[in-house]
Amino acid sequence: MADEHASAAPLKLHHPSPLAAEVAFSPPSSSSLAPSSHTSLQHERTHAAAQRTEAEEDADELRSFRELALQRQRAMGGGSQSSSFEPFVGSRVGSPIPDKHGLGWPGKGTLDRLNATPEETAARQKKLSDAVKVLLECIGEDPERDGLLKTPERYAKALLWMTKGYEERLPDVIGNAIFAEDHEEMVIVRDIDIFSLCEHHMVPFSGKVSIGYIPNKFVLGLSKLARIAETFSRRLQVQERLTKQIATAIDEAIRPMGVAVVIEATHQCMTMRGVQKPGATTITSSMLGAFRRSDKTRAEFMALIRSSQR
Ligand SMILES: [Zn+2]
């Protein structure tokens, strides 16, 4: 996704401007905002570059982008502190989330599935049921025996439900639960249950995800962290990617100082088949911003998600 705006930026921005979306999608009138902020930042840099670390520059840019976003929010008549804010998810220039429709990382047929007419949805279920009948035959069963008669239909419905995350748009998931707030301490929601399907075996893996972030002017409704995790886990996944997608989506939505996501899960493709290592868990993590830069911040997060009741 090389776009000229991002590649022309003078340094790697951890957080491109929230206003960058305007540059791409609105008439030229508003596009003067972002470039001028880049120019002044560049100017400032040439004078003071020697004394400043990259981290400090990141933080400064974040601050000014936030300020602009907040001013704009107020100017648009949001008025009060608690007014909601349109999430930035997957809709702006330079976004690491590749989809404009807000579907995150959709599959090839996601849009067809999402936009299906009731007739098409019925046809999809029928096709899936027929395929399950074939599965039953292939394992040497009799799809016509009593106990299995309804299984293909049930399984088809269950599989569509277990992959319903493909049909969920992040802006809908997040809704208007983004709030302007001056809280700057770490926010953690830990031990959120997740259930997913490993894409290599289409067999479940399940476990717990802990999510932390350090707000930067915006906070996300707490239940939304779990909803974001749910959206991406109800798809075919590998645990590493799931971890990263959750972190990236939160980073995109509220541009915090940093995001940390840790998933500890048990894969049934490991525990009930072949290698058979019951109880073996896989731990993956994704650290962005301050959690990546600072050992201390990361250690604080890890200590908090492991404290008590563990
Ligand atoms: Zn697997």
Image (cartoon, rainbow, N blue to C red):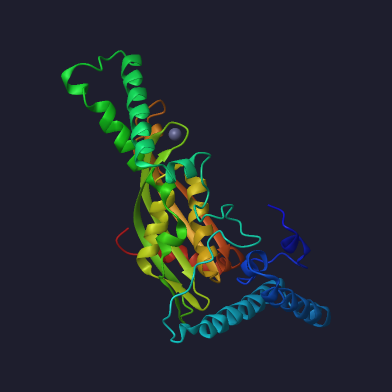
Q: Residue at x 59, y 82 (%)?
A: 67
x, y percent for residue 188: 41, 67
Residue 151 versus residue 284 in the image, above or below? above
Toward the viewer: 74 or 119? Answer: 119
Q: Residue at x 41, y 66 (%)?
A: 175
Q: Which residue is drawn at 83% across and 78% down?
A: 46
Q: Residue at x 61, y 62 (%)?
A: 92
* Image region (quadrant) for ligand 1: top left
In the image, taking residue 29 as reference, residue 89 lies left or right, namely: left
Residue 82 versus residue 141 in the image, above or below? below
- Split into 4 quadrants, where in the image is the C terminus? bottom left
Toward the viewer: 68 or 255? Answer: 68
Q: Which residue lies furthest to the right in this view?
A: 46
Q: Residue 21's image quarter?
A: bottom right
Residue 85 versus residue 150 in the image, above or below? below
In the image, taking residue 233 as reference, residue 108 lies left or right, namely: right
x, y percent for residue 15: 63, 67
x, y percent for residue 259: 51, 64
Q: Residue furthest left?
A: 146
Is residue 44 shown to the viewer in this render? yes
x, y percent for residue 112: 47, 41
Toward the viewer: 202 or 50? Answer: 202
Q: Residue 293's image quarter?
A: bottom right
**Count of residue discs:** 0
In the image, taking residue 242 as reference, residue 126 lies left or right, namely: left
Q: Residue 52's image quarter?
A: bottom right
Is residue 238 shown to the viewer in this render? no
